[in-house]
Amino acid sequence: MNYWKKFSHEERLEHIKKALGNNVNFAQDPSLGYPASKLDGRVFHDEAPFLKDSPTLQAFVANPNHIGCHTFGTSEKAFKGTQAIEREVLDVIAIDVFKAEPDGFDGYIAPGGTEANIQALWIYRNYFIKNFGACCSEIAIIASEDTHYSIPKGADLLMIDWCRIPVDSETRAISEITLEDSIKDAQEKGKKYFIVIANMGTTMFGSVDNTDVYTDILQKLGAHFKMHVDAAYGGFIYPFSNPASELHFGNPHVSSLTIDAHKMLQAPYGTGIFICRKGLIENVLTKEAEYVEGMDLTLCGSRSGANAVAVWMILFTYGAHAWFEKISVLQMRTAWLCKQLELLGIHYFRNPYMNIVTIKSNGISESVAQKFDLVPQKHDPTNQWYKIIVMDHVEIEHLSLFIQTLKDERKGLSKKLGSLFSILRILLKFRDEQESYL
Ligand SMILES: *Cc1c(COP(=O)(O)O)cnc(C)c1O
Protein backbone atom coordinates (compact mmCIF):
# COMPACT_ATOMS: atom_id res chain seq x y z
CA MET A 1 0.00 0.00 0.00
CA ASN A 2 1.91 3.01 -1.26
CA TYR A 3 -0.93 5.49 -1.56
CA TRP A 4 -3.38 4.56 1.21
CA LYS A 5 -2.24 6.36 4.34
CA LYS A 6 -3.85 7.33 7.61
CA PHE A 7 -3.93 11.06 8.39
CA SER A 8 -4.85 12.91 11.58
CA HIS A 9 -7.83 15.27 11.66
CA GLU A 10 -5.50 18.28 11.35
CA GLU A 11 -3.64 16.77 8.41
CA ARG A 12 -6.89 16.02 6.60
CA LEU A 13 -8.24 19.51 7.27
CA GLU A 14 -5.04 21.09 5.97
CA HIS A 15 -4.93 18.89 2.86
CA ILE A 16 -8.52 19.65 1.80
CA LYS A 17 -8.16 23.34 2.62
CA LYS A 18 -5.17 23.48 0.31
CA ALA A 19 -7.09 21.66 -2.43
CA LEU A 20 -10.06 24.04 -2.15
CA GLY A 21 -7.55 26.92 -2.20
CA ASN A 22 -6.34 25.68 -5.60
CA ASN A 23 -9.88 25.78 -6.99
CA VAL A 24 -11.60 28.91 -8.24
CA ASN A 25 -13.13 30.86 -5.35
CA PHE A 26 -16.51 32.04 -6.59
CA ALA A 27 -16.82 34.36 -3.58
CA GLN A 28 -13.65 36.32 -4.42
CA ASP A 29 -12.21 35.61 -7.86
CA PRO A 30 -13.57 37.42 -10.93
CA SER A 31 -14.84 34.30 -12.70
CA LEU A 32 -17.39 35.36 -15.26
CA GLY A 33 -17.89 32.43 -17.57
CA TYR A 34 -19.23 29.53 -15.51
CA PRO A 35 -22.89 28.51 -15.35
CA ALA A 36 -22.11 27.62 -11.72
CA SER A 37 -21.31 29.10 -8.36
CA LYS A 38 -20.93 28.10 -4.74
CA LEU A 39 -24.14 26.92 -3.12
CA ASP A 40 -26.82 29.58 -2.67
CA GLY A 41 -25.55 31.73 0.19
CA ARG A 42 -29.02 32.61 1.46
CA VAL A 43 -29.70 28.95 2.12
CA PHE A 44 -26.25 27.45 2.74
CA HIS A 45 -24.27 29.90 4.87
CA ASP A 46 -20.61 29.58 4.12
CA GLU A 47 -19.77 31.33 7.39
CA ALA A 48 -21.50 28.69 9.58
CA PRO A 49 -19.08 27.88 12.43
CA PHE A 50 -19.32 24.08 12.08
CA LEU A 51 -17.93 24.26 8.54
CA LYS A 52 -14.52 25.21 9.92
CA ASP A 53 -13.89 21.67 11.17
CA SER A 54 -15.56 19.80 8.36
CA PRO A 55 -13.60 19.59 5.10
CA THR A 56 -16.37 17.61 3.39
CA LEU A 57 -19.02 20.22 4.16
CA GLN A 58 -16.65 23.01 3.10
CA ALA A 59 -16.25 21.27 -0.24
CA PHE A 60 -20.01 20.78 -0.44
CA VAL A 61 -20.65 24.51 -0.01
CA ALA A 62 -17.81 25.50 -2.39
CA ASN A 63 -19.55 23.21 -4.93
CA PRO A 64 -16.72 22.27 -7.31
CA ASN A 65 -17.79 20.68 -10.59
CA HIS A 66 -15.71 17.66 -11.62
CA ILE A 67 -17.13 17.50 -15.13
CA GLY A 68 -14.99 15.31 -17.43
CA CYS A 69 -12.28 12.80 -16.56
CA HIS A 70 -9.14 13.88 -14.66
CA THR A 71 -6.79 11.00 -15.33
CA PHE A 72 -6.67 11.76 -19.06
CA GLY A 73 -5.43 14.85 -20.94
CA THR A 74 -6.37 18.25 -19.58
CA SER A 75 -9.30 19.22 -17.34
CA GLU A 76 -11.17 22.35 -16.25
CA LYS A 77 -8.48 24.36 -14.46
CA ALA A 78 -11.02 26.09 -12.20
CA PHE A 79 -11.29 22.93 -10.09
CA LYS A 80 -7.78 21.53 -10.31
CA GLY A 81 -7.36 21.42 -6.51
CA THR A 82 -10.16 18.97 -5.84
CA GLN A 83 -9.54 17.11 -9.12
CA ALA A 84 -6.16 16.19 -7.59
CA ILE A 85 -8.06 14.83 -4.56
CA GLU A 86 -10.10 12.65 -6.91
CA ARG A 87 -6.90 11.31 -8.48
CA GLU A 88 -5.57 10.46 -5.00
CA VAL A 89 -8.74 8.46 -4.33
CA LEU A 90 -8.39 6.63 -7.65
CA ASP A 91 -4.71 5.84 -6.94
CA VAL A 92 -5.64 4.18 -3.65
CA ILE A 93 -8.37 2.05 -5.19
CA ALA A 94 -6.82 1.26 -8.56
CA ILE A 95 -3.20 0.73 -7.50
CA ASP A 96 -3.25 -0.24 -3.83
CA VAL A 97 -6.45 -2.29 -3.76
CA PHE A 98 -6.77 -3.55 -7.36
CA LYS A 99 -3.08 -3.77 -8.37
CA ALA A 100 -3.09 -1.45 -11.40
CA GLU A 101 0.19 0.07 -12.57
CA PRO A 102 0.76 3.71 -11.54
CA ASP A 103 -0.47 5.90 -14.43
CA GLY A 104 -1.77 2.71 -16.05
CA PHE A 105 -5.47 3.46 -15.70
CA ASP A 106 -8.24 6.00 -16.25
CA GLY A 107 -11.31 6.52 -14.13
CA TYR A 108 -13.68 8.81 -12.32
CA ILE A 109 -16.20 9.01 -9.50
CA ALA A 110 -19.52 8.35 -11.19
CA PRO A 111 -23.00 9.00 -9.75
CA GLY A 112 -23.22 5.29 -8.91
CA GLY A 113 -22.48 1.69 -9.80
CA THR A 114 -25.18 1.76 -12.45
CA GLU A 115 -23.38 4.46 -14.43
CA ALA A 116 -19.98 2.84 -13.88
CA ASN A 117 -21.30 -0.45 -15.28
CA ILE A 118 -22.97 1.26 -18.25
CA GLN A 119 -19.79 3.25 -18.89
CA ALA A 120 -17.92 -0.08 -19.17
CA LEU A 121 -20.50 -1.56 -21.57
CA TRP A 122 -20.41 1.64 -23.65
CA ILE A 123 -16.60 1.59 -23.86
CA TYR A 124 -16.48 -2.05 -25.00
CA ARG A 125 -19.35 -1.72 -27.45
CA ASN A 126 -17.52 1.16 -29.13
CA TYR A 127 -14.18 -0.67 -28.86
CA PHE A 128 -15.56 -3.57 -30.90
CA ILE A 129 -17.23 -1.20 -33.38
CA LYS A 130 -14.09 0.92 -33.88
CA ASN A 131 -11.46 -1.82 -33.88
CA PHE A 132 -13.28 -4.68 -35.57
CA GLY A 133 -16.02 -2.93 -37.55
CA ALA A 134 -18.57 -4.80 -35.45
CA CYS A 135 -22.24 -3.93 -35.57
CA CYS A 136 -24.37 -3.95 -32.41
CA SER A 137 -26.11 -7.21 -33.34
CA GLU A 138 -22.72 -8.98 -33.36
CA ILE A 139 -21.92 -7.96 -29.77
CA ALA A 140 -23.32 -9.74 -26.69
CA ILE A 141 -23.01 -9.28 -22.95
CA ILE A 142 -22.37 -12.45 -20.95
CA ALA A 143 -23.34 -12.37 -17.28
CA SER A 144 -24.90 -14.68 -14.71
CA GLU A 145 -28.57 -14.52 -13.76
CA ASP A 146 -27.52 -13.07 -10.37
CA THR A 147 -25.98 -10.03 -12.09
CA HIS A 148 -27.23 -6.57 -11.08
CA TYR A 149 -30.08 -5.09 -13.10
CA SER A 150 -27.86 -2.21 -14.28
CA ILE A 151 -26.47 -4.67 -16.86
CA PRO A 152 -29.82 -5.37 -18.61
CA LYS A 153 -30.50 -1.63 -18.30
CA GLY A 154 -27.24 -0.90 -20.13
CA ALA A 155 -27.93 -3.62 -22.71
CA ASP A 156 -31.26 -1.96 -23.46
CA LEU A 157 -29.76 1.53 -23.78
CA LEU A 158 -26.84 0.41 -25.93
CA MET A 159 -28.92 -1.95 -28.08
CA ILE A 160 -26.81 -5.03 -27.40
CA ASP A 161 -28.11 -8.44 -26.34
CA TRP A 162 -27.56 -9.96 -22.93
CA CYS A 163 -26.88 -13.74 -22.62
CA ARG A 164 -28.21 -14.47 -19.16
CA ILE A 165 -26.27 -17.47 -17.85
CA PRO A 166 -28.15 -19.58 -15.27
CA VAL A 167 -26.47 -20.45 -11.97
CA ASP A 168 -26.73 -23.49 -9.72
CA SER A 169 -29.57 -22.84 -7.28
CA GLU A 170 -27.43 -23.85 -4.28
CA THR A 171 -23.85 -22.75 -5.07
CA ARG A 172 -24.90 -19.73 -7.23
CA ALA A 173 -22.00 -20.68 -9.56
CA ILE A 174 -22.24 -20.61 -13.35
CA SER A 175 -22.09 -24.07 -14.84
CA GLU A 176 -19.37 -24.59 -17.43
CA ILE A 177 -21.53 -26.76 -19.64
CA THR A 178 -24.41 -24.27 -19.76
CA LEU A 179 -21.99 -21.41 -20.38
CA GLU A 180 -20.29 -23.21 -23.26
CA ASP A 181 -23.65 -24.07 -24.80
CA SER A 182 -24.90 -20.48 -24.43
CA ILE A 183 -21.80 -19.04 -26.10
CA LYS A 184 -21.90 -21.58 -28.94
CA ASP A 185 -25.56 -20.80 -29.41
CA ALA A 186 -24.83 -17.05 -29.48
CA GLN A 187 -22.03 -17.61 -32.01
CA GLU A 188 -24.39 -19.55 -34.22
CA LYS A 189 -26.76 -16.60 -34.06
CA GLY A 190 -24.02 -14.29 -35.33
CA LYS A 191 -22.46 -12.97 -32.09
CA LYS A 192 -18.73 -12.49 -32.52
CA TYR A 193 -17.75 -10.12 -29.72
CA PHE A 194 -18.46 -10.63 -26.02
CA ILE A 195 -18.52 -8.32 -23.02
CA VAL A 196 -18.15 -10.43 -19.86
CA ILE A 197 -19.39 -9.11 -16.53
CA ALA A 198 -17.67 -10.89 -13.64
CA ASN A 199 -19.31 -10.32 -10.27
CA MET A 200 -17.36 -9.61 -7.13
CA GLY A 201 -20.29 -9.91 -4.76
CA THR A 202 -23.74 -10.15 -6.35
CA THR A 203 -26.39 -7.93 -4.80
CA MET A 204 -28.62 -10.73 -3.52
CA PHE A 205 -26.13 -13.49 -2.66
CA GLY A 206 -22.71 -11.87 -2.40
CA SER A 207 -21.55 -14.63 -4.76
CA VAL A 208 -18.25 -14.13 -6.60
CA ASP A 209 -17.74 -15.43 -10.14
CA ASN A 210 -14.81 -17.64 -11.05
CA THR A 211 -13.44 -15.76 -14.06
CA ASP A 212 -11.43 -18.76 -15.31
CA VAL A 213 -14.70 -20.42 -16.24
CA TYR A 214 -15.46 -17.50 -18.58
CA THR A 215 -11.99 -16.97 -19.98
CA ASP A 216 -11.20 -20.67 -20.56
CA ILE A 217 -14.37 -21.27 -22.56
CA LEU A 218 -14.21 -18.01 -24.53
CA GLN A 219 -10.59 -18.71 -25.47
CA LYS A 220 -11.40 -22.30 -26.39
CA LEU A 221 -14.16 -21.07 -28.69
CA GLY A 222 -11.86 -18.45 -30.21
CA ALA A 223 -14.13 -15.53 -29.27
CA HIS A 224 -13.08 -11.88 -28.91
CA PHE A 225 -13.97 -10.63 -25.44
CA LYS A 226 -13.42 -7.91 -22.84
CA MET A 227 -14.04 -8.43 -19.13
CA HIS A 228 -15.46 -5.95 -16.62
CA VAL A 229 -15.60 -6.71 -12.89
CA ASP A 230 -18.71 -5.52 -11.07
CA ALA A 231 -17.33 -5.00 -7.58
CA ALA A 232 -19.95 -2.32 -6.79
CA TYR A 233 -20.88 -4.11 -3.61
CA GLY A 234 -17.89 -6.37 -2.89
CA GLY A 235 -15.02 -4.07 -3.87
CA PHE A 236 -14.40 -2.74 -0.38
CA ILE A 237 -14.71 -6.19 1.28
CA TYR A 238 -13.55 -9.09 -0.86
CA PRO A 239 -10.00 -7.90 -1.70
CA PHE A 240 -9.41 -7.51 2.05
CA SER A 241 -11.04 -10.72 3.26
CA ASN A 242 -9.57 -12.86 0.46
CA PRO A 243 -5.99 -11.88 -0.37
CA ALA A 244 -5.85 -14.75 -2.90
CA SER A 245 -8.53 -13.05 -5.05
CA GLU A 246 -7.62 -12.87 -8.74
CA LEU A 247 -10.20 -10.24 -9.63
CA HIS A 248 -7.78 -7.34 -10.09
CA PHE A 249 -5.62 -5.69 -12.76
CA GLY A 250 -2.82 -8.21 -12.13
CA ASN A 251 -5.13 -10.56 -14.07
CA PRO A 252 -4.53 -9.69 -17.75
CA HIS A 253 -8.18 -10.45 -18.62
CA VAL A 254 -9.58 -7.80 -16.27
CA SER A 255 -9.99 -4.54 -18.22
CA SER A 256 -12.20 -2.47 -15.91
CA LEU A 257 -13.95 -2.33 -12.55
CA THR A 258 -16.92 -0.77 -10.78
CA ILE A 259 -16.62 -0.10 -7.03
CA ASP A 260 -19.32 1.78 -5.12
CA ALA A 261 -18.04 3.96 -2.30
CA HIS A 262 -21.65 4.62 -1.27
CA LYS A 263 -22.20 1.03 -0.14
CA MET A 264 -19.60 -0.60 2.15
CA LEU A 265 -17.50 2.55 2.47
CA GLN A 266 -20.55 4.49 3.73
CA ALA A 267 -19.79 7.53 1.55
CA PRO A 268 -22.66 9.80 0.45
CA TYR A 269 -24.70 8.67 -2.57
CA GLY A 270 -23.17 9.75 -5.83
CA THR A 271 -19.87 7.91 -5.33
CA GLY A 272 -19.77 4.95 -7.71
CA ILE A 273 -16.23 4.51 -8.97
CA PHE A 274 -15.22 3.49 -12.48
CA ILE A 275 -11.67 2.40 -13.34
CA CYS A 276 -10.30 0.95 -16.59
CA ARG A 277 -6.91 0.21 -18.09
CA LYS A 278 -5.30 3.00 -20.17
CA GLY A 279 -6.22 3.03 -23.83
CA LEU A 280 -9.91 2.20 -23.43
CA ILE A 281 -11.80 5.26 -22.19
CA GLU A 282 -11.06 7.14 -25.46
CA ASN A 283 -13.71 4.91 -27.05
CA VAL A 284 -16.39 7.09 -25.48
CA LEU A 285 -14.83 10.50 -26.09
CA THR A 286 -17.55 12.98 -26.95
CA LYS A 287 -15.75 15.41 -29.23
CA GLU A 288 -18.78 17.67 -29.35
CA ALA A 289 -18.24 18.55 -25.67
CA GLU A 290 -16.13 21.45 -26.84
CA TYR A 291 -16.90 23.90 -24.06
CA VAL A 292 -15.48 21.45 -21.49
CA GLU A 293 -11.72 21.82 -21.20
CA GLY A 294 -10.22 18.40 -22.02
CA MET A 295 -13.64 17.35 -23.36
CA ASP A 296 -15.76 14.63 -21.78
CA LEU A 297 -15.05 10.92 -21.42
CA THR A 298 -17.84 10.17 -18.94
CA LEU A 299 -21.51 9.38 -19.26
CA CYS A 300 -22.82 11.87 -16.69
CA GLY A 301 -21.25 15.26 -17.45
CA SER A 302 -21.35 17.56 -14.39
CA ARG A 303 -20.69 15.85 -11.06
CA SER A 304 -19.85 17.06 -7.59
CA GLY A 305 -16.23 17.39 -6.51
CA ALA A 306 -17.46 17.26 -2.89
CA ASN A 307 -18.08 13.53 -3.45
CA ALA A 308 -14.40 13.01 -4.20
CA VAL A 309 -13.54 14.87 -0.99
CA ALA A 310 -16.00 12.70 1.00
CA VAL A 311 -14.44 9.46 -0.28
CA TRP A 312 -10.94 10.82 0.29
CA MET A 313 -11.88 11.72 3.89
CA ILE A 314 -13.11 8.19 4.62
CA LEU A 315 -10.08 6.48 3.05
CA PHE A 316 -7.56 8.71 4.78
CA THR A 317 -9.31 8.66 8.17
CA TYR A 318 -9.03 4.86 8.29
CA GLY A 319 -5.88 4.04 6.39
CA ALA A 320 -5.51 0.52 4.99
CA HIS A 321 -4.95 -1.23 8.32
CA ALA A 322 -7.99 0.12 10.13
CA TRP A 323 -10.11 -0.69 7.07
CA PHE A 324 -8.84 -4.28 7.12
CA GLU A 325 -9.71 -4.45 10.81
CA LYS A 326 -13.23 -3.16 10.17
CA ILE A 327 -13.83 -5.78 7.48
CA SER A 328 -12.46 -8.50 9.79
CA VAL A 329 -14.99 -7.55 12.47
CA LEU A 330 -17.87 -7.75 9.97
CA GLN A 331 -16.59 -11.14 8.82
CA MET A 332 -16.57 -12.40 12.41
CA ARG A 333 -20.15 -11.24 12.98
CA THR A 334 -21.23 -12.91 9.74
CA ALA A 335 -19.53 -16.17 10.76
CA TRP A 336 -21.36 -16.00 14.11
CA LEU A 337 -24.71 -15.61 12.36
CA CYS A 338 -23.99 -18.56 10.03
CA LYS A 339 -23.07 -20.79 12.98
CA GLN A 340 -26.35 -19.98 14.75
CA LEU A 341 -28.34 -20.70 11.58
CA GLU A 342 -26.56 -24.04 11.26
CA LEU A 343 -27.42 -24.93 14.87
CA LEU A 344 -31.05 -24.24 14.02
CA GLY A 345 -30.78 -26.30 10.83
CA ILE A 346 -31.71 -23.32 8.65
CA HIS A 347 -30.45 -23.42 5.08
CA TYR A 348 -28.46 -20.43 3.73
CA PHE A 349 -25.91 -19.32 1.12
CA ARG A 350 -22.81 -17.34 1.99
CA ASN A 351 -19.58 -16.74 0.13
CA PRO A 352 -17.03 -17.29 2.95
CA TYR A 353 -15.31 -13.95 2.20
CA MET A 354 -18.47 -11.84 2.15
CA ASN A 355 -20.84 -10.36 4.73
CA ILE A 356 -24.10 -11.33 3.01
CA VAL A 357 -26.11 -14.29 4.29
CA THR A 358 -29.00 -15.31 2.03
CA ILE A 359 -31.48 -17.55 3.81
CA LYS A 360 -33.94 -19.98 2.21
CA SER A 361 -37.38 -18.49 2.77
CA ASN A 362 -38.80 -21.75 4.13
CA GLY A 363 -36.61 -21.30 7.21
CA ILE A 364 -38.03 -17.83 7.99
CA SER A 365 -41.62 -16.83 8.65
CA GLU A 366 -42.92 -13.75 6.88
CA SER A 367 -43.51 -11.96 10.18
CA VAL A 368 -39.87 -12.42 11.26
CA ALA A 369 -38.67 -11.28 7.83
CA GLN A 370 -40.80 -8.16 8.17
CA LYS A 371 -39.84 -7.47 11.76
CA PHE A 372 -36.12 -7.48 10.89
CA ASP A 373 -36.45 -5.82 7.48
CA LEU A 374 -34.90 -8.74 5.60
CA VAL A 375 -34.79 -8.10 1.88
CA PRO A 376 -36.54 -10.74 -0.29
CA GLN A 377 -35.10 -11.82 -3.63
CA LYS A 378 -38.49 -11.09 -5.20
CA HIS A 379 -41.37 -9.01 -3.94
CA ASP A 380 -43.95 -11.65 -4.88
CA PRO A 381 -45.19 -15.06 -3.65
CA THR A 382 -42.56 -16.95 -5.68
CA ASN A 383 -39.84 -15.55 -3.41
CA GLN A 384 -37.36 -18.20 -2.21
CA TRP A 385 -34.68 -16.21 -0.38
CA TYR A 386 -34.21 -13.46 2.21
CA LYS A 387 -30.90 -11.70 2.73
CA ILE A 388 -29.12 -10.28 5.73
CA ILE A 389 -26.25 -7.88 5.14
CA VAL A 390 -23.92 -7.53 8.08
CA MET A 391 -23.13 -3.83 7.73
CA ASP A 392 -21.44 -1.68 10.35
CA HIS A 393 -24.76 -0.99 12.13
CA VAL A 394 -25.67 -4.70 12.31
CA GLU A 395 -24.15 -5.83 15.59
CA ILE A 396 -24.12 -9.22 17.33
CA GLU A 397 -26.76 -7.78 19.64
CA HIS A 398 -29.16 -7.35 16.71
CA LEU A 399 -28.25 -10.67 15.18
CA SER A 400 -28.79 -12.51 18.45
CA LEU A 401 -32.21 -10.87 18.84
CA PHE A 402 -33.01 -12.23 15.38
CA ILE A 403 -31.81 -15.73 16.30
CA GLN A 404 -33.73 -15.61 19.61
CA THR A 405 -36.90 -14.62 17.73
CA LEU A 406 -36.45 -17.61 15.43
CA LYS A 407 -36.02 -19.87 18.47
CA ASP A 408 -39.04 -18.38 20.27
CA GLU A 409 -41.15 -18.80 17.19
CA ARG A 410 -40.17 -22.46 17.04
CA LYS A 411 -40.91 -22.91 20.74
CA GLY A 412 -44.28 -21.23 20.25
CA LEU A 413 -44.96 -23.53 17.37
CA SER A 414 -43.97 -26.65 19.27
CA LYS A 415 -46.06 -25.49 22.24
CA LYS A 416 -49.05 -25.06 19.95
CA LEU A 417 -48.36 -28.46 18.42
CA GLY A 418 -47.94 -29.84 21.95
CA SER A 419 -51.37 -28.59 23.07
CA LEU A 420 -52.89 -29.85 19.84
CA PHE A 421 -51.49 -33.29 20.63
CA SER A 422 -52.83 -33.19 24.23
CA ILE A 423 -56.31 -32.33 22.93
CA LEU A 424 -56.04 -35.17 20.44
CA ARG A 425 -54.93 -37.52 23.23
CA ILE A 426 -57.94 -36.54 25.39
CA LEU A 427 -60.29 -37.01 22.45
CA LEU A 428 -58.85 -40.44 21.71
CA LYS A 429 -59.10 -41.44 25.36
CA PHE A 430 -62.71 -40.19 25.41
CA ARG A 431 -63.49 -42.24 22.32
CA ASP A 432 -61.88 -45.35 23.88
CA GLU A 433 -63.97 -44.88 27.01
CA GLN A 434 -67.10 -44.45 24.91
CA GLU A 435 -66.29 -47.62 23.05
CA SER A 436 -65.74 -49.56 26.24
CA TYR A 437 -69.26 -48.58 27.40
CA LEU A 438 -70.78 -49.92 24.21
C1 LIG B 1 -25.60 -1.69 -6.04
C2 LIG B 1 -25.02 -2.41 -7.15
C3 LIG B 1 -24.91 -1.85 -8.43
C4 LIG B 1 -25.51 -0.50 -8.83
O1 LIG B 1 -25.23 0.47 -8.02
P1 LIG B 1 -25.98 1.86 -7.85
O2 LIG B 1 -24.93 2.54 -7.10
O3 LIG B 1 -27.25 1.61 -7.11
O4 LIG B 1 -26.19 2.45 -9.19
C5 LIG B 1 -24.30 -2.58 -9.42
N1 LIG B 1 -23.83 -3.81 -9.17
C6 LIG B 1 -23.93 -4.41 -7.95
C7 LIG B 1 -23.40 -5.78 -7.76
C8 LIG B 1 -24.53 -3.73 -6.90
O5 LIG B 1 -24.64 -4.32 -5.71
Image: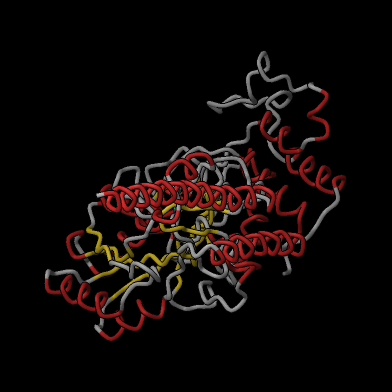
Residue extending farthest top: 42
- Residue 98 occupies quadrant: bottom right
Q: Residue furthest front?
A: 437
Q: Residue at the spot x=42%, y=48% of the render?
A: 114
Vertical comparison of 275 with 352: above or below:
above
Coloured how?
secondary structure
Q: Position of residue 332 (x, y in %)?
A: 67, 64
> Is residue 21 visible to the viewer in this orientation of the structure?
yes
For residue 277, side relative to residue 311 (left or right): left
The residue lying at 27 percent from left, 51 percent from top is 435
Query: Can you give x and y, in whole percent of width and height, for residue 33 in the image?
Result: 56, 27
State whether residue 226 is above or below residue 6: below
Is residue 202 found left or right of 433 in the rendered image? right
386 above or below 132? above
Given residues 258 and 207, the one toward you in this image is: 207
Give the percent coordinates (x, y) of residue 123.
37, 58
> Which residue is farthest bottom?
220
Q: Residue at the location (18% across, 69% down)? A: 191
Residue 206: horizontal and vertical position, in percent?
48, 61
Which residue is more in the foreground, 16 or 294?
16
* Quarter of the image that includes the N terminus: bottom right
